[in-house]
Structures are given as C-alpha cells and as structure tokens.
Amino acid sequence: MMDILWLVLLGVLAGTLGGMGIGGGAILIPALTMFFGASQHAAQNINLLYFIPTAIFAVIVHKKGGRIEGKILPWIIVGGVVGSVAGSLIALNLQAEVLRYIFAGFLFIMGIAEFFKKAEPQK
C-alpha cells in the first residue's frame, strides 16, 4: 500500500513539472529505476504512456492561457512524431545500460544548458 502512495506522489510531482513545461520524465524515469526497481526500458515506456494524458491537460490549460503559438505547432508535431518513431526504433535495439547512459547524458547536458541560460524578461 505504501508503494502505491509513493507512486501516486511521484505521479503528482512529475505531472506538476510536466504541466509547467519542464518535463516530468526527468523526475519520473530516474525515480522508477532507482527507487522502484523498474528497468530502464520499462521506465521510459511508462513515461511515454504517462505523458499522453498529462500533455493533453497541459495543452488545454496553456491554450486557454494564450501561451501556444498555433503557427509553429503543426511543424513541431510533425517533427515530434517522426522523432518519436525513430527514437522508439532505436531504443528497442539498445541495451538497457546504453539507454540509461544516453538518458543520463541528456539530463546532464540539459542541466548545464539551463545553468548557463540567461533569464528572459517577463512579458
């Protein structure tokens, strides 16, 4: 029962970050692998499934807030679909350890980029 509560709390945290546009997978995937014993492939697949409903709600909220630029959206969606198919095919053929290192490298690079990113003035 306690595991279920921790998983719900993890989902709330990841969903909150995802709704903010930060990406809940950065929390969800490491937590599932380190604290709940999920394999790297399973954690990343769970993240993909979790992402669908959270993304839908986030898009609705951000659209109502006028924060989505409709002109670029179709191009990003097309690129995202092509990239997700390619990434899925690649991930299926990688060993879990390699996939884990790629994910860790991605998080490291994103962290460094955010650290040196200049703050934009608020509108």
Image (cartoon, grey):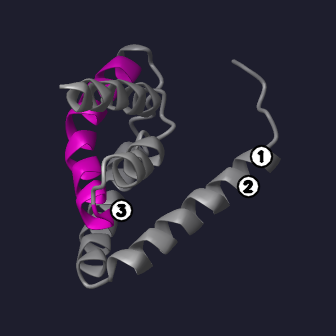
| In front: label 2 or label 3 | 2
- Tell me where the magenta segment starts and ends, as one range: 39-63
Marks 2 and 1, how far apart at CA:
5 Å
Question: Which numbered dot is residue 79?
Answer: 3
In the rendered view, tell whether residue 95 sits above or below residue 55.
below
In-front residue for pair 110/61: 110
Residue linked to disc 2? 112
- In the rendered image, residue 9, in percent from the top left (x then y), is placed at 34, 24
Quick one: 102 or 31, which is closer to the camera? 31
Identity, as a three-letter code, of the amino acid under mark 2: Ile
Assess whether mark 3 and mark 1 are in contact (beta carbons under 8 angstroms). no
Q: Residue at x 30, y 80 (%)?
A: 90
Mark 3 is surrounded, within 10 Å at the Cα level, by few (under 14), some (14 to 19) or many (20 or more) other residues, namely few
Which element carries disc 2, helix, strand or loop?
helix
Image point (44%, 69%), residue name: 100
First-in-chain label (2 vs 3): 3
Residue 52 belongs to the span the image colors magenta: yes
Q: Residues within 10 Å of mark 2 (few under 14, many from 20)?
A: few
Decide: is 14 above or below 62: below
Say which of marks 1 and 3 sits in front: 1
Q: In this figure, which residue is indicated by the disc labeled 1?
A: 115
Secondary structure state at the residue bearing disc 3: helix
